[in-house]
Image (cartoon, rainbow, N blue to C red):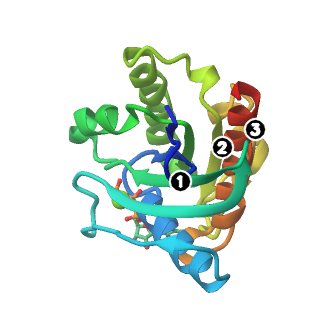
Amino acid sequence: MSIINPHTKEINCKIVFYGPALAGKTTSLKALQKLVKSSKKTVQKEITTENRTLFFDFLALSSLETVGGYRVKFQIYTVPGQVLYEDSRKLLLSGVDGIIFVADSRLEHIEESLSSYEELKLNLRKLDYNPEDIPTVIQYNKRDASTAANLDELNKILNKDKWPHVESTASQGEGVIDAFERLAHEVVLSLKQAA
Ligand SMILES: Nc1nc2c(ncn2[C@@H]2O[C@H](COP(=O)(O)OP(=O)(O)OP(=O)(O)O)[C@@H](O)[C@H]2O)c(=O)[nH]1
Ligand SMILES: [Mg+2]
């Protein structure tokens, strides 16, 4: 749920990177931080991370977009993908305005991506959201891997809900900005529709 601050004329939106363990969520957030900074957009940075995410990583970005004279800001979180942290994942979805689902493109990891996606929908429902109402982009990561499945196959298995999808190799910074901009566009659109 976006938070509107009439004093600072800002709308704060919450974006969550969700997906299975080791799919590349933290790598994507770090790449986003680096790339946005180098293209001179406003960034407040604060990433708290271990090699494996234990609770969340966080990045705040200020967009140049305005809605009704209010500047749009994004509070971006990654969930910990390891199976045992399900409670944290659910907690982090509270108040979400948009989701980047980071899937592992490698064929041998497709089951993990699928069960993480099903868990995402279940957790959204538990929080009384209709998953269809939350703008989502599917980011197919690890496109550089030799066992990466082709996009048609991935979409057939993982994207039955037909969300926009983007290919990425987060470890090389490729596709990460695309995925974020795609989602930011959808989130701003839904804010404008609600305004
Ligand atoms: N080959 C390749 N490796 C990647 C890519 N993206 C991330 N990795 C590697 O995959 C591993 C896991 O990446 P993380 O970003 O920590 O994964 P995560 O989804 O945050 O994992 P959790 O925090 O456990 O949920 C690291 O060794 C990354 O360097 C990619 O596009 N290609
Ligand atoms: Mg992580």
Label 1 secondary element: strand
Tell me which image quadrant ligand 1 sits in. bottom left
| Residue receiving disc 1 | 74
Residue 63: give x, y in percent of width and height: 64, 61
Disc 2 crowd rating (10 Å Cα; few below 14, some 14-19, many 20+) is many
Q: What is the tally of numbered marks visible in this picture? A: 3
At horizontal 43% and vertical 63% (from top left) the residue drawn is 59
Residue 186 sits above or below residue 162 on the image: below
Q: Amino acid at mark 2?
A: Val
**Res 176 seen here:** yes
In the image: residue 149, left or right of residue 33: right
At horizontal 69% and vertical 26% (from top left) the residue drawn is 194
Residue 31 sits above or below residue 108 on the image: below
Residue 96 sits above or below residue 5 on the image: above
**Disc 2 from disc 3: Cα separation:** 14 Å
Please identify the residue farthest to the front as the structure is shown.
7
Residue 9: give x, y in percent of width and height: 57, 50
Please identify the residue farthest to the bottom as the structure is shown.
38
| Residue receiving disc 2 | 137
**Disc 2 from disc 1: Cα separation:** 15 Å
The foreground one among 150 and 29 is 29
In the image: residue 178, left or right of residue 136: right
Q: Amino acid at mark 1?
A: Phe
Residue 161: give x, y in percent of width and height: 69, 25
